[in-house]
Amino acid sequence: MRENKNISADTNDGKTVAIIAYLTIIGLVAALVMNSKNATNLGRFHIRQSIGITVTALVAGILRFIPMVGNILVSVIGIAILVMLVLGILSAVKGEEKELPFIGHLYQKWFSVI
């Protein structure tokens, strides 16, 4: 009986880490710390997705310096990032390891060290 309780506790810890990872950069850092103490596959998966979204947002911010077209690109990418955040949070709440559309598989590959 105890083993079942531990498995569900690990699943809940993984879901908690997964959800927290999407809540700002501070949440991402907190999720990294929490996951380093009690690593779960679900937590690592969503931390990688969240890091990818964060890096994408930072790179998109640099595009703002391109005259005329930069602001339009940043606006479009900003909407895509918002959609990715919502999809990531929904996946984390459900406890699923569902990659984000179009680029999620690359995040898993690029940040596989985590």
Image: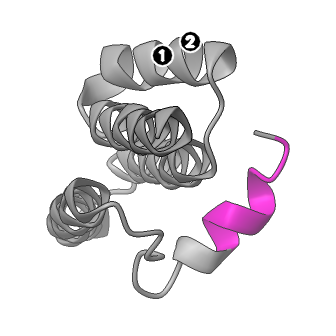
Q: Nearer the viewer, mark 2 or mark 1?
A: 2
Is residue 95 part of the magenta span, yes or no?
no
Identify the element where label 1 is drawn.
Answer: helix
Q: Along the line of sight, which residue is nearer the eye, 17 or 58?
A: 17
Q: From the viewer's perspective, is 103 left or right of 24?
A: right
Q: Along the line of sight, which residue is nearer the eye, 33 or 15?
A: 15
The residue drawn where x is 77% and y is 58% is: 110
Q: How many marks?
A: 2
Crowding around mark 2 (Cα neighbors within 10 Å: few <14, some 14 to 19, many 20+) is few
Q: Along the line of sight, which residue is nearer the eye, 86 or 74?
A: 86
Q: Which mark identifies residue 94?
A: none
Span highlighted in magenta in the image: 106-113
Amino acid type for the residue under numbered disc 1:
Val
The residue drawn where x is 17% and y is 69% is: 83
The residue drawn where x is 52% and y is 44% is: 55
In the picture shown, does residue 32 fall above or below 77?
A: above
Give the labeled residue for mark 1: 29
Q: Which mark identifies residue 33?
A: 2
Answer whether labels 2 and 1 touch (C-beta < 8 Å). Answer: yes
Picture coordinates of residue 1, whole percent (x, y): 46, 40
